[in-house]
Image: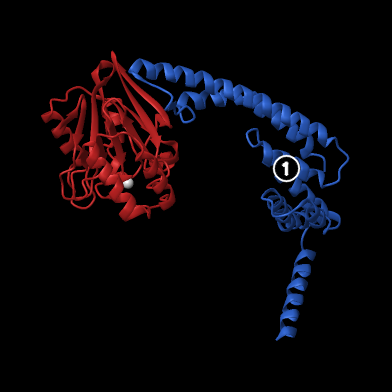
Amino acid sequence: MKLVNNLYTYVWQGNDNNCNSYLFADVLKGNRHVVIDPGHITTPSYREPGLIKLFKEMEKDGIEGTTGLVILTHAHPDHCEAASMIREQNSALVALHEADGNIYKRSGGIVDIYLEEGELQLANGSQTRLQIYHSPGHSPGHITIYWPEEKVLIAGDVIFYRSTGRVDLPGGNAKTIKQSIERLSGLDINYLLCGHPYGHPGIIEGKEEVQQNFDFIKSHILF
Amino acid sequence: MEEEKIKSALEIAMEKVAKMADLTPQEIREQKEREYRPRGEVTANKYLSHVYKNVDLAVELNKYQGEEDEIVRKAFLSFLCRAIQLDEADKSLRAIEGIQALDIAFDFDRVKGEFEEISSAFNQEREKTYQKLEDSQREILNGLGISGSAVRPNVKENASFQNELNQMRAPYDMRIDKLKDKMLYLI
Ligand SMILES: [Zn+2]
C-alpha cells in the first residue's frame, strides 16, 4: 500500500511470525526499487509463502521492474531470509550494519554494503535522502532508517505499538535499546513504521500518535 | 596402595628400558623425538598464548639435558618460527622474542627490525589496494544510484580484493620465509 510519496508499506497479514516490509519505488537508476526487510521466504511454523505474498502485494500496487537494493534493519531470519533470493533473482545488492554481518553471513548471506551512521542517498534523477541510525539493543547491528523529507522512521524491531523489541535474544541488550529509543524519540516523526504487526498493523501515523507511543513505552516499559 | 603405585611406575620404566635395549640408535632417537618434541611445542604454544611470561619460559627450557634438551629446543624454535606470519605482527614479534629465550648468539634485533619493515610495507600496499577497490566500488554504486556517508562497500570479502591481495602478498611472504629460515637452523 502506498503510504507517502513513493514509499510503500507491506504489513504482514499471515498467521505465523514474519516482518512488515517497506519499499521505496523507482528510487535507483533504471527505476529499480529499494526493499527494506523482505522477511521470510516461507514462514517456519505454518509454511506460509512470505516472499510470494510480498511480491503479490507489490504487483497489486503496480510495482513493476526489479529491486536493486535490499536493506536489512537487522539480521534476524524473520527480516532477512528472503534477501539472498532477491539478490540472486534481481542482481540486487544487500546492505546491513557490520555488527550484524556475521550472523547474516553464518546463515549463508552475502553482504555487498555495510551501512553505518550517516546519510544514504538514493538517486534516480531526483534524490531520496535517508538518514541511517545505528540503533542497537534488539541486535548489535540494528539500524533504523529516517526519511526527514516525509518525517518517516522505519524502526525495525526497536519499537512497536506500545512495546519494544526483545532483548533476550543473542546480542540483545536492555540498556542499549533504551538508549536507542531515547535517541529516536527526539526525531520529528509523522510515520512510525514498525517491524511487526504486533496487536496493531505497526504503522503509527500522526505526530501525536507517535509521541504518545514513545511516552507509553518510556513510562510503562523502559523507565 | 601407594607402594603398589610406585612399584608399577617402576615396572613401567623398567619395561621401557628393556624395550629400548632392543632398539637401534636411530629408533631410540625417533622415540625420544616422539616424546620430547611435543614438550617443546606445548611450551612454545603456551608462551604464544600468554600462559607463560618470559621468566617461566627460561625455567621451562632449562629442564632438559643432552639429546632431550636439543629436541625440546628445536621443537620450540620451529613452532615459534612457524608462528611468524605477515599479517600477525604482534604474534610474530612475540615469537621472535620467545626465540631469544633460547639464549643463542644471534642478532635478533635485526630480525625484528626486518620483520617490522616488511610488515609495514605490506600493510601500506594492502591499504592502497583496499582504497583503490573501495573507490572503484563506490563509483559502481554511484552509477546504480547509491551513495552517501552511510555507505561502505564490503571490499574485504570481495573476490577481486582477495585475488589482488593474494598476488600482492606473495613477495612479502617470501621475504618472511627467508627471515624464518635464518632462525630455523640456529640449533
Ligand atoms: Zn528481530
A58 lies above or below B40: above
Query: Which quadrant holds the N terminus of chain B?
Result: bottom right
- Residue at the location (82% across, 59% down)? B63
Q: Most extreme residue toward the left, as rendered?
A: A60
B15 lies above or below B124: below
- Seen in the image, is A212 located left or right of residue B181? left
Residue A74 in the image, given as x and y percentages of width and height: 35, 40
Residue at disc 1, CB closer than 8 Å to ligand 1: no
Which chain did the image draw in red?
A: A
Is residue A164 visible to the viewer in this orientation of the structure? no
Residue B43 in the image, given as x and y percentages of width and height: 72, 54
Residue underneath mark 1: B94
- Residue at the location (18% across, 44% down)? A201
**Which residue is nearer to you in this view: B110 or A172?**
A172
- Residue at the location (76% across, 29% down)? B114
**Which residue is nearer to you in this view: B68 or A140?**
A140
- Seen in the image, is B33 located left or right of residue A217? right
Is residue B177 visible to the viewer in this orientation of the structure? yes
* Chain letter, disc 1 residue: B
Residue B176 in the image, given as x and y percentages of width and height: 70, 31
Query: Which quadrant holds the C terminus of chain B?
Result: top right
A153 lies above or below B44: above
In the rendered image, which quarter is residue A102 located in?
top left
- Identified by mark 1, the residue type is Arg
In the rendered image, which quarter is residue A220 located in?
bottom left
Which chain did the image draw in blue?
A: B
> How busy is the neighbourhood of tag 1: few (under 14 within 10 Å), some, or many (20 plus)?
some
Query: SS at mark 1?
Result: helix
